[in-house]
Amino acid sequence: MYTLIGLPKTRAFRVMWMLEELGLAYEQIPTPPRDPSLAAINPSGKVPVLKVGDDYIIDSVAICQFLADKHNRFTFPAGTIERAHQDSFTQFSVDDIEGPLWTAAKHTFVLPAELRIEDVKKACRYDFDRAIQALSERLGTRSYVMGDGFTVPDLLIAHCCGWASTMGWTLPQGNVADYVARVRARPAFQKAWSIREKA
């Protein structure tokens, strides 16, 4: 059994969703970011953390990819050209889509009030919209970013787009909006979301 450390309304949701996709048993410890109990595991104080045996993995992207690799689902094998393309989408989701979201969040509630710059959020929205346009072009008519099958970056991108919607950053109608709705309609997402909403 895995132990997931982190509140469901943080990036820990991504790991919970992946665990549900894989049908794996797990225990959840709803620890908030920067909790003192995290200091020895992750000096940055961030969640999620996944306990695997006597070891710990930090960072939601690393955890999701580890689970996919370990259980040989929702990923292409390392060293293949398909995996390189998959990793490209993963990196795109973190750099181009999540980056503006996280910067905007920091200037909304994370940073001390005296360090927040309201106008930064305008630039973040501009970058986010550019990323969605690039995603639209890369996605084309495919069901998922890698074709017909769901992979790790689909989970990350759909999570980020849901995060954007909570900030009032809506997606334009078209292939990306349809894609995100399709990914979030997956039964594992719905189950994880139900757990999140009850937390």
Image (cartoon, rainbow, N blue to C red):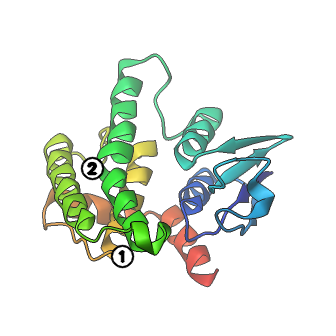
In the picture, measured across the screen, residue 5 lies left or right of residue 20, that is right
Amino acid tagged 2:
Ser
Image quadrant of residue 194?
bottom right
* Residue 185 visible at all: no
Number of numbered labels in the structure image: 2
Q: Nearer the viewer, residue 46 or 14?
A: 46
x and y percentages locating residue 152 in the rendered image: 46, 44
x and y percentages locating residue 93 in the rendered image: 35, 46
SS at badge 2: loop
Q: Classify 147 as above or below 5.
A: above
Q: CA distance from mark 1 to mark 2?
A: 24 Å
In the picture, measured across the screen, residue 115 lies left or right of residue 25, that is left
Name the residue at the top extreme: 79
* Residue at image coords 59%, 54%: 15
Name the residue at the front extreme: 114
* Residue 24 visible at all: yes
Of marks 1 and 2, which one's residue comes earlier in the chain? 2
* Residue at image coords 61%, 60%: 16
* Residue at image coords 62%, 41%: 67
In the picture, measured across the screen, residue 50 lies left or right of residue 133, that is right
Image quadrant of residue 106?
bottom left
SS at badge 1: helix
Amino acid tagged 1:
Thr
* Residue at image coords 30%, 61%: 180
| Residue that numbered label 1 is attached to | 166
x and y percentages locating residue 139 in the rendered image: 20, 45
Q: Quadrant of the C terminus?
A: bottom right
| Residue that numbered label 2 is attached to | 143
Q: Nearer the viewer, residue 124 or 145?
A: 124
Q: Nearer the viewer, residue 80 or 111?
A: 111
Q: Classify 46 as above or below 85.
A: below
Callout 1 environment at 10 Å: few (<14), some (14 to 19), or many (20+)?
Answer: few
